[in-house]
Image (cartoon, rainbow, N blue to C red):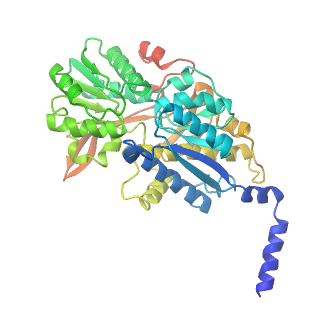
């Protein structure tokens, strides 16, 4: 009986297509770059890592994801993750990217939360002709200042976060005369503030700025900035703080009534609701960088993701997790589209890139259109809501969804030009 079983397996092996055997013997390797240490690790890096691991485990099992993503791995080819830490700054990340490509031979890179890191690694990835999918950074400058063949971002830019925030404030806060901001002093914070202030001024030109605070990324202590804001007595406070900086702002600002003396808008605030729900007062305006986390739509992909993620983590998936899995959905979509239904085919990097350029695909956060940056930059809808505690649980009210075309510039126009033109 044992001999017969061995012969049967051997016969199946010998009759299998050569291309399929080659794919099965060589996984598609993805370098995953996310924060594994430092302040951003807890709220950002670790949730993103868990999402990547959940995706890899489930997709390699086959039949776990809803169609059309139900094939094993990428078109029948198992995927393998090489996870590295994003901590250390831009110079280190450029070096790490080169190492992933030149020494470890990864087939693709999925990574980067910091906008500074994205700006630094994108030209290098292009030089190395390695398909690189930016999964979380938000600065619109990536594709507004350069053209790429191998670099993509299957998540939306921060422009929609901040244009959407200004639209939401304009529509839901009937009377206000002044506004202030506290944002990190680098590409992400600078772009976020410029987009919010520009949009707000186009909607309500009569409102007045009281103060704009720009502490350095990772400063940790914000008492001086909080004092300046409280002293200026604004009606609206905007912040694009994320990760440990966001948690520090909530922890230090709440006891000083920062959130009670003004309407506070946290464009990336969704990550804090799982770890600091009791410290976020009612009425705080929260964003999740798109239809992610608590604002994700009801669909089969989201049902799958929440169940798979919650089986691995005691904390529900937040928007960095959604951004990671959405980017991996994009990678699988592009690989299998490039195959054209032929699982024996191993598409080239150029074929995979061509398949993703200008594409539309579905995922746990709904529809994603690669419609900006000459087809390399995604747009989605934007969602905001206000916090309200009900029976001791943080909930959201006054939720408004903005269509992608309402909160993103048209192709060929920069965010700055679009906002200056009053979102037209």
Q: Nearer the viewer, residue 172 or 339?
A: 339
Q: Is residue 278 visible?
A: yes
Q: Is residue 360 above or below residue 142?
A: below
Horizontally, is 163 left or right of 342 in the view?
left
| Residue lying farthest to the bottom in this orientation | 1
Quadrant location of the N terminus in the rendered image: bottom right
Query: Residue 49: x percent and y percent?
Result: 48, 50
Horizontally, is 183 left or right of 351 in the view?
left
Q: Nearer the viewer, residue 205 or 348?
A: 348
Query: Residue 410: x percent and y percent?
Result: 53, 22
The residue drawn where x is 53% and y is 46% is 84
Q: Nearer the viewer, residue 223 or 264?
A: 223
Query: Residue 179: x percent and y percent?
Result: 24, 20
The residue drawn where x is 80% and y is 83% is 4
The residue drawn where x is 56% and y is 60% is 64
Query: Residue 6: x percent and y percent?
Result: 79, 79
Q: How many numbered callouts? A: 0
Q: Nearer the viewer, residue 139 or 71?
A: 139
Q: Is residue 381 above or below residue 2?
A: above
Q: Where on the picture, by quarter, is residue 108? A: top right
Q: Where on the picture, by quarter, is residue 312? A: bottom left
Q: Is residue 358 visible?
A: no
């Amino acid at each position: 009986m044992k001999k017969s079983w061995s012969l049967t397996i051997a016969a199946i092996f010998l009759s299998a297509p050569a291309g399929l055997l080659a794919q099965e013997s060589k996984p598609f390797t993805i370098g995953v770059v996310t924060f594994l240490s430092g302040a951003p690790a807890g709220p950002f890096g670790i949730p993103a890592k868990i999402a990547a691991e959940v995706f890899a485990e489930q997709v390699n099992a086959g039949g776990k994801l809803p169609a059309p993503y139900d094939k094993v791995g990428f078109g029948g080819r198992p995927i393998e993750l090489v996870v590295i830490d994003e901590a250390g700054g831009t110079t280190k990340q450029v070096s790490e990217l080169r190492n992933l490509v030149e020494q470890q031979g990864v087939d693709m890179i999925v990574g980067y939360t910091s906008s500074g890191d994205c700006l630094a690694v994108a030209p290098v990835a292009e030089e190395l002709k390695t398909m690189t999918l930016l999964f979380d950074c938000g600065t619109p400058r990536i594709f507004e200042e350069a053209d790429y063949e191998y670099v993509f971002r299957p998540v939306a830019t921060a422009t929609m976060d901040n244009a959407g925030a200004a639209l939401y404030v304009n529509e839901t806060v009937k009377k206000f005369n002044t506004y202030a901001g506290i944002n990190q002093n680098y590409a992400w914070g600078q772009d976020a503030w410029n987009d919010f202030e520009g949009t707000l001024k186009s909607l309500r030109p009569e409102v007045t700025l009281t103060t704009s605070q720009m502490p350095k990324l990772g400063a940790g202590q914000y008492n001086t900035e909080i004092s300046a804001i409280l002293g200026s007595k604004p009606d609206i406070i905007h912040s694009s703080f994320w990760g440990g900086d966001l948690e520090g702002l909530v922890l230090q600002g709440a006891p000083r009534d920062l959130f009670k003396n003004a309407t506070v808008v946290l464009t990336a605030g969704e990550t804090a609701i799982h770890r600091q729900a009791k410290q976020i007062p009612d009425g705080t305006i929260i964003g999740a960088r798109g239809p992610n986390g608590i604002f994700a739509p009801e669909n089969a992909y989201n049902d799958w993701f929440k169940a798979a993620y919650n089986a691995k983590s005691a904390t529900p998936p937040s928007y960095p997790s959604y951004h990671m899995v959405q980017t991996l959905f994009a990678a699988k979509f592009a690989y299998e589209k490039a195959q054209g239904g032929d699982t024996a085919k191993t598409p080239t990097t150029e074929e995979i890139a061509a398949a993703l350029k200008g594409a539309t695909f579905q995922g746990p956060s709904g529809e994603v259109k690669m419609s900006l940056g000459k087809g390399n930059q995604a747009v989605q809808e934007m969602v905001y809501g206000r916090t309200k505690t009900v029976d001791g649980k943080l909930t959201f009210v006054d939720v408004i969804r903005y269509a992608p075309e309402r909160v993103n510039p048209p192709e060929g126009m920069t965010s700055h030009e679009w906002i200056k033109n009053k979102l037209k």
